[in-house]
Image (cartoon, rainbow, N blue to C red):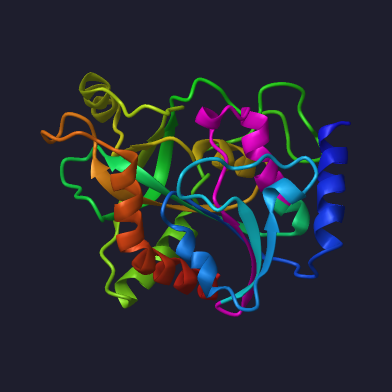
Amino acid sequence: MDLMQRLDETLRAMRERVAVRPQIGVILGSGLSTLAERIEKPCFLPYGELPNMKRSTAPGHEGRFVLGPLAGVPVVCMQGRLHRYEGHSMEEIAFPVRLMRQMGIKTLILTNAAGGINEGFRPGDIMLLRDHINLMGANPLIGPNEEALGERFFDMSRAYPEALRNTAKRCAQELDIPLKEGVYLATSGPNFETPAEIRMMRSLGADAVGMSTVPEVLAAAHMGLPVLAFSLISNLAAGMKNEVLSGEDVIRVGLSRAEALSALVSAVIARI
């Protein structure tokens, strides 16, 4: 079964259970799943109950779609994403983004937890992505191109449209939520980076580092889908402080700032 057939099969299974026709897709990162609680009269679809969808095994990820109105706008929310370190292929990570596009979304909003590389960042800061660096060693577009989704070669200079970023900045200002802006660098994980790697990443121009998001952005850009993305700085990266990094701390900081990020994303959804 080819990609388009698998997408059609999964979409049919979803529409047999849910009538919502979403306009915006949202993917939630580690410790940031509370945004889904703002969805009115939510419909839940666990990934494992849908054909062709892989299960999420990462800590702090519920592993389900949540559909319904948010800020008056019909949305589909991924309460937990797929990661390469779980053993998923890049195509499997990109599949839900392609599925949401087939559902009819016009904008994709992404959140993640990331380590701060910029020396001006502190845990709890929210960073708006203006660009990214892919050091995952792979790309979900490698292999035969599906012309029904997008062209073989496509531009990435406007992957994070300025108009969307400006909307996010205005919403943050109105809500009195401090908002940083910077470049996100993606690695495959699951280990945190070494101090030497962090020094290299800083020299490349990265402000934060994480283990997700970029495959989803690549799939969206291939389909011409505008992206808005936020990183919650959950810790300072290796070597920046004399402390041991842990996944538990990432989730803890995510939970502590989830309400602020949820409020910001909700305000943006109401505007676009």
Q: Quadrant of residue 149?
A: top right
Residue appearing at x 87%, y 54% in the figure: 12
Q: Can residue 188 be seen in this view?
A: yes
Whole-percent x, y for residue 55 in the image:
64, 42
Q: Is residue 239 left or right of residue 17?
A: left
Whole-percent x, y for residue 105 in the image:
69, 59
Whole-percent x, y for residue 263 in the image:
41, 72
Whole-percent x, y for residue 23 in the image:
67, 66
Give the answer, above or below, for where 247 lies relative to 256: above
Q: Is residue 109 left or right of residue 9?
A: left
Give the answer, above or below, for where 164 lies relative to 171: above
Give the answer, above or below, for where 100 lies relative to 59: below
Q: Can residue 182 be seen in this view?
A: no
The residue furthest left is: 242
Magenta span covers which residues?
71-99
Q: In this view, does 48 lie to the left or right of 200?
A: right
Image quarter hosting the N terminus: top right
Q: Which of 271 and 80 is in front in this view?
A: 80
Residue appearing at x 48%, y 25% in the figure: 136
Q: Nearer the viewer, residue 169 or 37?
A: 37
Residue appearing at x 75%, y 67% in the figure: 21
Image quarter hosting the C terminus: bottom right
Q: Nearer the viewer, residue 246 or 164?
A: 246
Residue appearing at x 31%, y 53% in the figure: 252
Give the answer, above or below, for where 177 lies relative to 28: below
